[in-house]
Image (cartoon, grey):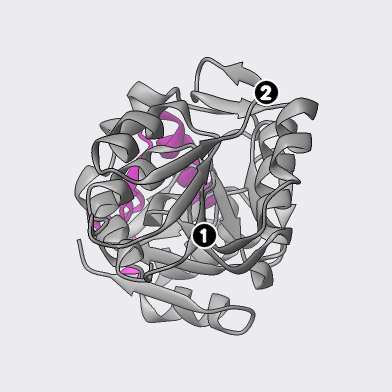
């Protein structure tokens, strides 16, 4: 089978299934595993797919944005592991910015209630669990985006300007070694970018499904924040270690 034909078959399979394994591709194309691995590298370079452990996945569209309910049920064990590690980075006396998002929401349950910290957030969903822990909380005002429960827009940007942070914890939709941190909504991207600028230390919480993805709006270069993720192979880690700190936790 010609290389071009194999590539077409791989892409067509990914249109039917979001994820395919290397063994599936070997069986479908009747070729060797080494050939399929080479094909996947070439197709990833052309941005036709994303390699994942044991196979490949379809790249999300630039404006794809699941709502908060859809995201809450996805990769939950990974998010919990990432959140638990992230919470361990918070120290007594810290001023924290906590982004709207499901990974950052998970972090709150692992916060030590004995810590004296201040949290600023633009995530409406974060408010109740923060208050239930007795954590001093400030909420950024602005336009409330229904799908993500995030405060965004010019008023939110003006509000966040009043603060300075020891650490910020952000969620994103895409992390790419050369195209950086991205998210579908330009106004959410602006909020995340400003939080990075106002923080001494910055962390992006993202399960492995976000690695290699590219959304519509740029937030920042990956050098601007450490990445906390899960279960990615050493080859992928090496791509990011050249530019930033990446911590891989087990889920």
Q: Quadrant of residue 83?
A: bottom left
Residue 132 position within the rendered picture, expressed as x and y whole percent measured from the top left: 24, 36
Q: What secondary structure is found at the residue carrying circle 1? A: strand
The answer to whether 89 appears left or right of 124 in the picture is left
Binning the other alpha carbons within 10 Å of mark 1 as few (below 14), some (14 to 19) or many (20 upward) gives: many
Q: Which residues are drawn in magenta?
A: 5-33
The answer to whether 237 appears left or right of 239 in the picture is left
Q: Based on the picture, tell me whether residue 137 belongs to the magenta stretch.
A: no
Q: Residue furthest top?
A: 146
- Front in this rendered view, residue 250 or 3: 250
Is residue 251 visible in this depiction of the protein?
Answer: yes
Residue 121 position within the rendered picture, expressed as x and y whole percent measured from the top left: 52, 40
In the drawing, what numbered circle is on residue 95? 1
In the drawing, what numbered circle is on residue 142? 2
Q: What secondary structure is found at the residue carrying circle 2? A: loop
Most common SS among magenta residues: helix
The answer to whether 197 appears left or right of 12 in the picture is right
């Amino acid at each position: 089978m010609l290389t071009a034909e194999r590539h077409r078959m791989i892409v067509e399979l990914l249109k039917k299934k979001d994820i395919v394994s290397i063994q599936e591709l070997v069986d479908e194309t009747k070729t060797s595993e080494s050939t399929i691995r080479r094909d996947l590298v070439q197709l990833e370079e052309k941005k036709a797919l994303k390699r994942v452990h044991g196979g490949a996945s379809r790249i999300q569209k630039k404006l794809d944005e699941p709502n908060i309910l859809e995201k809450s049920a996805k990769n939950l064990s990974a998010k919990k592991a990432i959140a638990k590690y992230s919470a361990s980075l918070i120290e007594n006396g810290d001023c924290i910015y906590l982004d709207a998002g499901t990974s950052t929401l998970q972090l709150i349950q692992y916060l030590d209630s004995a810590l004296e910290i201040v949290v600023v957030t633009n995530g409406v969903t974060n408010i109740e669990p923060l208050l239930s822990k007795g954590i001093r909380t400030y909420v950024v005002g602005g336009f409330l985006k229904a799908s993500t429960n995030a405060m965004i827009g010019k008023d939110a940007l003006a509000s966040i300007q009043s603060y300075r942070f020891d650490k910020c914890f952000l969620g994103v939709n895409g992390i790419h070694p050369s195209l950086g941190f991205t998210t579908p909504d330009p106004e959410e991207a602006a909020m995340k970018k400003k939080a990075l600028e106002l923080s001494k230390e910055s962390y992006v919480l993202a399960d492995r499904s976000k690695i290699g993805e590219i959304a519509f709006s740029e937030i920042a270069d990956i050098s601007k924040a450490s990445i906390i993720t899960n279960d990615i192979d050493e080859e992928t880690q090496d791509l990011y270690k050249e530019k930033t700190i990446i911590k891989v936790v087990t889920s």
